[in-house]
Image (cartoon, helix red, strand yellow):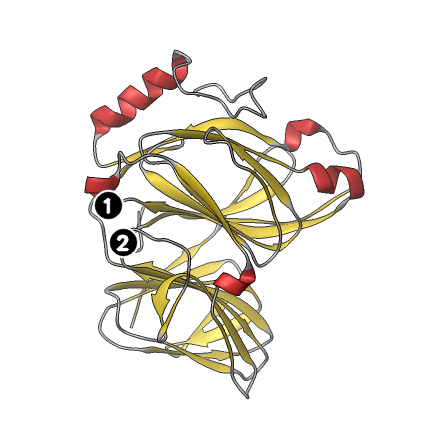
Protein backbone atom coordinates (compact mmCIF):
# COMPACT_ATOMS: atom_id res chain seq x y z
CA UNK A 1 0.00 0.00 0.00
CA UNK A 2 2.99 2.33 0.55
CA UNK A 3 4.57 3.05 -2.81
CA UNK A 4 7.53 5.14 -1.61
CA UNK A 5 9.02 6.64 1.55
CA UNK A 6 10.82 9.98 1.17
CA UNK A 7 13.21 11.32 3.80
CA UNK A 8 13.40 15.10 4.11
CA UNK A 9 16.65 16.74 2.99
CA UNK A 10 17.67 19.44 5.48
CA UNK A 11 19.00 22.70 4.05
CA UNK A 12 20.25 25.88 5.73
CA UNK A 13 18.66 28.95 4.15
CA UNK A 14 21.04 31.41 5.75
CA UNK A 15 19.76 31.50 9.31
CA UNK A 16 17.14 28.77 9.61
CA UNK A 17 16.75 25.24 8.35
CA UNK A 18 14.10 23.70 6.13
CA UNK A 19 13.48 20.07 5.29
CA UNK A 20 12.89 19.70 1.54
CA UNK A 21 10.50 16.83 0.88
CA UNK A 22 9.15 17.57 -2.61
CA UNK A 23 10.34 17.59 -5.30
CA UNK A 24 12.70 14.61 -5.13
CA UNK A 25 14.38 12.59 -7.86
CA UNK A 26 12.12 9.61 -7.20
CA UNK A 27 8.92 11.65 -6.88
CA UNK A 28 8.35 15.08 -8.38
CA UNK A 29 4.72 15.67 -7.38
CA UNK A 30 1.82 14.27 -5.35
CA UNK A 31 -1.40 15.34 -7.04
CA UNK A 32 -0.87 19.06 -7.76
CA UNK A 33 1.60 19.45 -4.85
CA UNK A 34 4.91 20.23 -6.52
CA UNK A 35 6.90 21.55 -3.54
CA UNK A 36 6.80 20.77 0.17
CA UNK A 37 9.20 22.37 2.69
CA UNK A 38 9.19 21.80 6.44
CA UNK A 39 10.39 25.07 8.03
CA UNK A 40 12.18 24.68 11.35
CA UNK A 41 11.52 24.21 14.13
CA UNK A 42 14.00 27.00 14.77
CA UNK A 43 14.49 29.33 17.73
CA UNK A 44 15.46 32.96 17.18
CA UNK A 45 16.90 35.42 19.67
CA UNK A 46 15.69 39.04 19.55
CA UNK A 47 17.61 41.23 17.12
CA UNK A 48 18.74 38.56 14.67
CA UNK A 49 19.94 40.01 11.32
CA UNK A 50 17.60 40.97 8.47
CA UNK A 51 19.67 38.74 6.19
CA UNK A 52 17.58 35.83 7.51
CA UNK A 53 14.45 37.30 5.88
CA UNK A 54 13.29 36.03 2.50
CA UNK A 55 13.70 39.07 0.24
CA UNK A 56 11.32 39.83 -2.66
CA UNK A 57 11.34 37.12 -5.32
CA UNK A 58 9.04 36.01 -8.16
CA UNK A 59 6.71 33.08 -8.94
CA UNK A 60 4.62 31.95 -11.90
CA UNK A 61 2.20 29.09 -12.51
CA UNK A 62 1.40 28.07 -8.94
CA UNK A 63 -0.25 28.86 -5.63
CA UNK A 64 1.81 28.99 -2.45
CA UNK A 65 0.27 27.78 0.81
CA UNK A 66 1.96 28.79 4.05
CA UNK A 67 0.79 27.18 7.31
CA UNK A 68 2.44 27.68 10.70
CA UNK A 69 2.49 25.64 13.89
CA UNK A 70 4.51 28.29 15.76
CA UNK A 71 5.78 31.81 15.09
CA UNK A 72 4.79 34.60 12.72
CA UNK A 73 5.77 35.64 9.20
CA UNK A 74 4.95 38.98 7.52
CA UNK A 75 3.98 38.61 3.86
CA UNK A 76 4.09 41.47 1.33
CA UNK A 77 3.40 41.07 -2.38
CA UNK A 78 3.00 42.87 -5.69
CA UNK A 79 -0.82 42.72 -5.63
CA UNK A 80 -0.76 44.94 -2.52
CA UNK A 81 -1.20 42.39 0.25
CA UNK A 82 0.53 43.05 3.58
CA UNK A 83 -0.39 40.25 5.96
CA UNK A 84 1.08 38.62 9.06
CA UNK A 85 0.36 34.90 9.25
CA UNK A 86 -0.14 33.27 12.64
CA UNK A 87 -0.36 29.60 13.69
CA UNK A 88 -3.43 27.82 12.34
CA UNK A 89 -4.04 30.32 9.53
CA UNK A 90 -3.54 29.92 5.78
CA UNK A 91 -1.73 32.38 3.53
CA UNK A 92 -2.78 31.40 -0.01
CA UNK A 93 -1.05 33.31 -2.79
CA UNK A 94 -1.82 32.53 -6.42
CA UNK A 95 1.02 33.57 -8.72
CA UNK A 96 -0.66 32.84 -12.06
CA UNK A 97 1.02 34.94 -14.76
CA UNK A 98 3.40 36.43 -12.23
CA UNK A 99 3.71 37.75 -8.69
CA UNK A 100 6.52 38.85 -6.39
CA UNK A 101 6.54 38.64 -2.61
CA UNK A 102 8.72 38.76 0.49
CA UNK A 103 8.58 36.94 3.82
CA UNK A 104 9.92 38.93 6.76
CA UNK A 105 10.34 37.88 10.38
CA UNK A 106 9.53 41.21 12.00
CA UNK A 107 7.78 40.03 15.18
CA UNK A 108 10.35 37.30 15.79
CA UNK A 109 13.14 39.85 15.31
CA UNK A 110 11.59 42.14 17.90
CA UNK A 111 10.56 39.53 20.47
CA UNK A 112 12.44 36.32 19.69
CA UNK A 113 10.75 32.94 19.64
CA UNK A 114 10.23 29.81 17.57
CA UNK A 115 9.34 29.37 13.92
CA UNK A 116 7.78 26.10 12.75
CA UNK A 117 5.59 25.45 9.74
CA UNK A 118 5.11 24.07 6.25
CA UNK A 119 5.23 25.84 2.92
CA UNK A 120 3.71 24.01 -0.05
CA UNK A 121 3.46 24.93 -3.70
CA UNK A 122 0.43 23.75 -5.67
CA UNK A 123 0.72 23.72 -9.45
CA UNK A 124 -2.14 25.41 -11.28
CA UNK A 125 -4.03 23.51 -14.00
CA UNK A 126 -2.58 24.21 -17.43
CA UNK A 127 -5.54 26.35 -18.54
CA UNK A 128 -5.19 28.53 -15.40
CA UNK A 129 -1.42 29.01 -15.31
CA UNK A 130 -1.73 32.57 -16.67
CA UNK A 131 -4.57 33.87 -14.48
CA UNK A 132 -4.20 37.15 -12.61
CA UNK A 133 -2.28 36.90 -9.32
CA UNK A 134 -4.19 37.12 -6.03
CA UNK A 135 -3.76 36.69 -2.27
CA UNK A 136 -6.02 35.50 0.56
CA UNK A 137 -5.53 34.97 4.27
CA UNK A 138 -7.85 32.49 5.98
CA UNK A 139 -8.45 32.30 9.72
CA UNK A 140 -9.02 28.96 11.47
CA UNK A 141 -12.80 29.48 11.32
CA UNK A 142 -12.56 28.88 7.54
CA UNK A 143 -10.91 25.49 8.05
CA UNK A 144 -13.19 22.62 9.19
CA UNK A 145 -12.05 20.73 12.29
CA UNK A 146 -12.89 17.37 13.80
CA UNK A 147 -12.00 15.63 17.06
CA UNK A 148 -12.45 11.94 17.86
CA UNK A 149 -12.94 10.44 21.33
CA UNK A 150 -9.66 8.50 21.13
CA UNK A 151 -7.44 11.55 20.57
CA UNK A 152 -7.38 12.49 16.87
CA UNK A 153 -7.74 16.22 16.15
CA UNK A 154 -8.01 17.15 12.46
CA UNK A 155 -8.12 20.41 10.48
CA UNK A 156 -8.86 20.46 6.75
CA UNK A 157 -6.54 23.19 5.51
CA UNK A 158 -7.52 23.20 1.84
CA UNK A 159 -9.66 21.26 -0.60
CA UNK A 160 -12.21 18.56 0.18
CA UNK A 161 -12.09 15.32 2.14
CA UNK A 162 -13.66 13.33 4.95
CA UNK A 163 -17.03 14.83 4.01
CA UNK A 164 -15.84 18.40 4.62
CA UNK A 165 -14.72 21.34 2.47
CA UNK A 166 -12.28 24.14 3.33
CA UNK A 167 -13.14 27.73 2.39
CA UNK A 168 -9.71 28.16 0.80
CA UNK A 169 -10.36 28.62 -2.93
CA UNK A 170 -8.45 25.87 -4.73
CA UNK A 171 -8.36 25.47 -8.50
CA UNK A 172 -8.10 21.70 -8.90
CA UNK A 173 -9.31 18.69 -6.87
CA UNK A 174 -7.04 18.28 -3.83
CA UNK A 175 -6.91 17.81 -0.08
CA UNK A 176 -4.51 19.06 2.60
CA UNK A 177 -5.10 18.17 6.24
CA UNK A 178 -3.38 18.65 9.62
CA UNK A 179 -3.68 15.86 12.20
CA UNK A 180 -2.65 15.98 15.85
CA UNK A 181 -2.71 12.51 17.40
CA UNK A 182 -2.35 11.30 20.96
CA UNK A 183 -0.50 8.01 21.42
CA UNK A 184 -2.84 5.21 20.39
CA UNK A 185 -5.17 7.45 18.37
CA UNK A 186 -6.34 6.19 14.98
CA UNK A 187 -7.23 7.92 11.75
CA UNK A 188 -8.07 6.91 8.20
CA UNK A 189 -7.03 8.42 4.89
CA UNK A 190 -9.84 7.73 2.37
CA UNK A 191 -9.22 6.30 -1.09
CA UNK A 192 -11.12 9.00 -3.01
CA UNK A 193 -8.06 10.68 -4.62
CA UNK A 194 -5.66 8.90 -6.99
CA UNK A 195 -2.51 10.43 -5.46
CA UNK A 196 -2.06 10.63 -1.69
CA UNK A 197 0.76 11.11 0.79
CA UNK A 198 1.35 11.69 4.50
CA UNK A 199 4.24 13.59 6.10
CA UNK A 200 5.18 13.09 9.75
CA UNK A 201 6.10 16.44 11.29
CA UNK A 202 6.66 15.13 14.82
CA UNK A 203 6.40 11.78 16.56
CA UNK A 204 5.86 8.32 15.10
CA UNK A 205 2.90 6.64 13.42
CA UNK A 206 2.05 3.28 11.95
CA UNK A 207 0.61 3.66 8.43
CA UNK A 208 -0.60 0.61 6.55
CA UNK A 209 1.47 -1.57 8.87
CA UNK A 210 4.72 0.36 8.41
CA UNK A 211 6.43 2.66 10.91
CA UNK A 212 6.94 6.30 9.86
CA UNK A 213 9.04 8.73 11.89
CA UNK A 214 9.45 12.52 11.95
CA UNK A 215 10.78 13.89 8.65
CA UNK A 216 9.40 11.08 6.49
CA UNK A 217 6.74 11.25 3.79
CA UNK A 218 4.92 8.11 2.67
CA UNK A 219 3.39 8.11 -0.82
CA UNK A 220 0.54 5.62 -1.08
CA UNK A 221 -0.67 3.45 -3.92
CA UNK A 222 -4.19 4.28 -5.11
CA UNK A 223 -7.36 2.38 -4.46
CA UNK A 224 -7.53 1.56 -0.75
CA UNK A 225 -8.03 3.54 2.49
CA UNK A 226 -4.97 3.84 4.73
CA UNK A 227 -5.26 3.27 8.48
CA UNK A 228 -2.97 5.26 10.81
CA UNK A 229 -2.20 4.54 14.45
CA UNK A 230 -0.09 6.95 16.51
CA UNK A 231 2.83 5.13 18.15
CA UNK A 232 3.58 8.29 20.14
CA UNK A 233 2.06 11.74 20.24
CA UNK A 234 2.34 12.86 16.61
CA UNK A 235 1.67 15.60 14.08
CA UNK A 236 0.90 14.47 10.53
CA UNK A 237 0.12 16.36 7.32
CA UNK A 238 -1.96 14.57 4.67
CA UNK A 239 -1.96 15.77 1.08
CA UNK A 240 -2.76 14.86 -2.50
CA UNK A 241 -5.35 15.13 -5.22
CA UNK A 242 -5.81 14.81 -8.96
CA UNK A 243 -2.60 15.12 -11.02
CA UNK A 244 -2.37 18.19 -13.26
CA UNK A 245 0.26 16.83 -15.65
CA UNK A 246 4.01 17.25 -15.95
CA UNK A 247 5.50 20.45 -14.57
CA UNK A 248 8.93 21.99 -15.02
CA UNK A 249 10.50 23.71 -12.01
CA UNK A 250 13.40 26.12 -12.14
CA UNK A 251 14.23 28.32 -9.17
CA UNK A 252 10.86 29.80 -8.08
CA UNK A 253 9.10 29.21 -11.39
CA UNK A 254 6.68 26.36 -12.16
CA UNK A 255 5.14 25.81 -15.58
CA UNK A 256 3.97 23.20 -18.07
CA UNK A 257 6.21 25.00 -20.60
CA UNK A 258 10.00 25.30 -20.52
CA UNK A 259 9.73 28.33 -22.81
CA UNK A 260 7.46 30.09 -20.30
CA UNK A 261 10.03 29.57 -17.56
CA UNK A 262 12.75 31.04 -19.79
CA UNK A 263 10.52 34.07 -20.37
CA UNK A 264 9.96 34.49 -16.62
CA UNK A 265 13.70 34.30 -16.01
CA UNK A 266 14.31 36.98 -18.64
CA UNK A 267 11.57 39.18 -17.17
CA UNK A 268 13.05 38.95 -13.67
CA UNK A 269 16.59 39.54 -14.90
CA UNK A 270 15.46 42.65 -16.81
CA UNK A 271 13.41 44.08 -13.92
CA UNK A 272 10.07 43.71 -15.69
CA UNK A 273 8.27 42.12 -12.73
CA UNK A 274 6.79 44.58 -10.24
CA UNK A 275 8.13 44.40 -6.69
CA UNK A 276 5.88 44.65 -3.60
CA UNK A 277 4.92 48.30 -3.02
CA UNK A 278 5.80 48.06 0.67
CA UNK A 279 9.05 46.14 0.09
CA UNK A 280 10.64 47.34 -3.16
CA UNK A 281 14.14 48.32 -2.06
CA UNK A 282 15.70 44.86 -2.32
CA UNK A 283 15.25 41.58 -4.16
CA UNK A 284 16.83 38.16 -4.74
CA UNK A 285 18.74 38.10 -8.06
CA UNK A 286 18.22 35.24 -10.50
CA UNK A 287 20.74 32.54 -9.53
Q: Residues under labels 2 and 1: Cα distance? A: 7 Å
Outermost residue on the top side: it is: 270
Residue labelled with disc 2: 172
Can see residue 139?
yes
Q: Give the camera-side residue of 103 and 233.
A: 103
Mark before the other along the chain sequence, 2 or 1: 1
The residue under the point 35% across, 17% down is 267
Residue 126 occupies quadrant: top left
Residue 24 appearing in the image:
no
Up/down of 89 relative to 17, above or below: below
Query: How far across and down, in percent of the image, does residue 159 sit?
Result: 36, 61
| Mark 1: few/some/many CA within 10 Å (<14, 14-19, 20+) | some
Q: Please state the horizontal and vertical placement of residue 144, each as a whole percent of the image.
A: 47, 69
The residue positioned 79% from the left and 43% from the top of the image is 111
> Which quarter of the rendering shows the N terminus?
bottom left
| Rendering coords of residue 53 (x, y %) | 62, 32
Secondary element under disc 2, as helix, strand or loop, is loop
How crowded pointer 2 is (Cα within 10 Å; few <14, some 14-19, many 20+) is rated as some
Q: How many marks?
A: 2
Q: Secondary structure at mark 1?
A: loop
Q: Nearer the viewer, residue 230 or 6?
A: 230
Residue placed under numbered mark 1 in the picture = 125
Amino acid sequence: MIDLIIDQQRKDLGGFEVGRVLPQVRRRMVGPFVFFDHMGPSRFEPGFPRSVDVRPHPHIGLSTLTYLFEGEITHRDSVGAHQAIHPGEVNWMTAGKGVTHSERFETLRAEGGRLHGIQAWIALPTELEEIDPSFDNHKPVDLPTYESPDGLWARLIAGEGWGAKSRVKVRSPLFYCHWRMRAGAKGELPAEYPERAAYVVEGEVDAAGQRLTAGQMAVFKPGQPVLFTAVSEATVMLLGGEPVGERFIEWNFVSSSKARIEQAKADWRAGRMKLPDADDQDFIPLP
